[in-house]
Image (tube, helix red, strand yellow):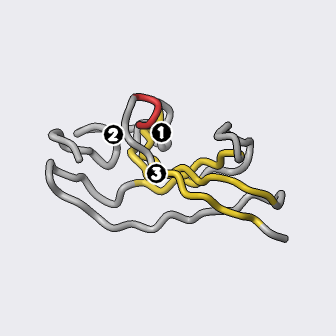
Amino acid sequence: MSDVTWFQRGGEISNQTDNKFYLAAGNQWLDKDGKQTSEEEGHNGIPKNLKPGEETQMTLLITAPKTPGEYFMRLDMVQEGVTWFGDKGSTTTKVPVTVVK
């Protein structure tokens, strides 16, 4: 939830040819102690600009870690090339995941 518009491209006007500044939902893999692993992250840009109070549904393609074990998958929003929202104090969602071979 926000009281400002979330622009899909990270700004009302953006001429970036890469994904820098785009807003995305993403996941990060944490080990059982809560430390980030070097496993692959997933990112999927928001599909449209979102005004305050608006919501959208989206799909996030997630790749499980290759090494079997106990993990947490942290779901968060990210401004590409800037920061994860959770690193700035936003609430994230952590889901326990068991990876088996």
Q: Which residue carries the number 1 mark?
A: 80
- Say left or right for 40 vs 8: right
Compared to residue 19, the image places residue 64 above or below, namely below
| Residue at image coords 73%, 48% | 39
Kind of residue at badge 2: Gly
State which tag comes first along the sequence, 1 or 3: 1
Alpha carbon distance from label 1 to label 2: 8 Å
For residue 47, which quarter of the picture? bottom left
The location of residue 79, given as percent across then percent down, is: 42, 38
Q: Which mark is residue 10?
A: 2
Q: Who is closer to the viewer here, 35 or 27?
A: 35
Q: Please tell me whether mark 3 or mark 2 is closer to you in this view.
A: 3
Q: Which residue carries the number 3 mark?
A: 93
Kind of residue at badge 1: Glu
The location of residue 8, given as percent across then percent down, is: 32, 49
Compared to residue 55, the image places residue 17 above or below, namely above
Label 2 crowd (10 A; few <14 / some 14-19 / many >=20): some
| Mark 3 and mark 2 residues within 8 Å of each other at the beta carbon | no
Mark 3 residue element? strand
| Mark 1 and mark 3 residues within 8 Å of each other at the beta carbon | no
Mark 1 residue element? loop
Kind of residue at badge 3: Thr
| Mark 1 and mark 2 residues within 8 Å of each other at the beta carbon | yes
| Residue at image coords 56%, 65% | 61
State which tag comes first along the sequence, 1 or 2: 2
Label 3 crowd (10 A; few <14 / some 14-19 / many >=20): few
Q: Who is closer to the viewer here, 45 or 12?
A: 45
Mark 2 residue element? loop
| Residue at image coords 22%, 53% | 50
- Say left or right for 38 vs 62: right
- Say left or right for 2 vs 66: left
Alpha carbon distance from label 1 to label 3: 19 Å
